[in-house]
Amino acid sequence: MENVRYALVWKPPWGFLAQFPNLKAILALGAGVDPIPSDPALPKDVPLLRLVDVGFPAQMADYAMYAVLRFQRRMGEIEALQRQARWNQLDPFFTRDFPVGVMGLGVIGSVVAKRVATAGYTVAGWARSPKRLDGVEVFAGSGTFKKFLSRARVVINALPLTPQTENVLDAAAFASMPRGGYVVNIGRGAHLVDRDLIAALDSGQLDGAMFDVFREEPLPSSHPFWGHPKIIVTPHVAAPTIASEVQAQVIENIRRLERGESPLGLVDRDRGY
């Protein structure tokens, strides 16, 4: 154990990293690091690094763009009509009447917001602190959250998971959105209060949802999301890992650390990103 200087991990069990007394860095093999910082035995002075820009943002933007187009063009309803052999032409929503909100404007959320804005949608972003992003109206801080939600027909969550953002997609958030809205979650499963989402869909407050992340993965076969007619479930495939990109960044970070240089993806443990 004394010879281990670098730990490459993905959701290690609590206490696992404490057995390596000479660690120089912990390299998480993902863009998110939860629940690593919450490990009470985590070595306090060892840098925690996450993967950045290894193909994740572009893939996430593709996924988000597909979700927006699917909801705007009412493809779920059209597919349901096909199963009934019904020829019923539905009017789509116009792009100008389909504003999009992106929660989280970090590495991934910024790319998502810009991609959707480039497609001609009115886009707003919500972040913890003020930011500037071309083509995107930015709302900053908790005091602007309801206002941000109130102007978004579809909300895309790309937030990191922290104690402050856990359960952020709850009944109060859905009630702040325009009636008939949509939710897309590419952040973390714990951002969402599952029962509140189902209640909002069943009441008509929301018209649809598309989720790639869940509190428990794989999603249990008994979970109500599977059979709900307004929910699209994808099995954590929004941004598959590109092995060559990950390998290159891990090697680069180890080389930087060996040279005494700043590494890529250094995590602020208090904020979780």
Image (cartoon, grey):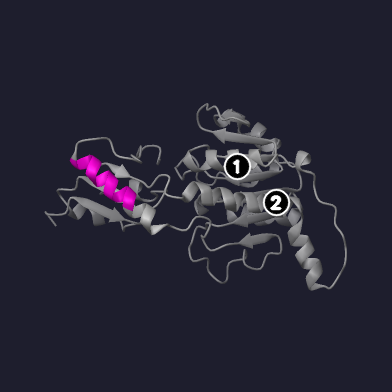
Tell me the element at label 1.
helix
Give amino acid for label 1: Arg
Per the image, the residue denoted by label 2 is 69
73 horizontally vs 167: left or right: right
Q: Which is nearer the eye, 50 or 114?
A: 114
Q: Which is nearer the eye, 13 or 3?
A: 3
Q: Is residue 256 located in the magenta-colored stretch of the structure?
A: yes
Residue 86 spot, x, y in % from top left: 86, 69
Per the image, the residue denoted by label 1 is 115
Task: Give neighbour class at mark 2: few <14, some 14-19, many 20+ (Cα, 10 Å).
Answer: some
Give amino acid for label 2: Leu
Where, quadrant-wise, is the C terminus in this rendering?
top left
Is any part of residue 87 visible from this angle? yes
Where, quadrant-wise, is the N terminus in this rendering?
bottom left
Q: Main secondary structure of the magenta part?
A: helix
For residue 231, which quarter of the picture?
bottom right
At 68% across and 45% down in the image, what residue appears? 154
Q: Is residue 17 located in the magenta-colored stretch of the structure?
A: no
Residue 131 spot, x, y in % from top left: 52, 28
Residue 99 spot, x, y in % from top left: 71, 39
Q: Which residues are drawn in magenta?
A: 248-258
Tell me the element at label 2.
helix
Distance (Cα) linking label 1 and label 2:
12 Å
1 horizontally vs 108: left or right: left
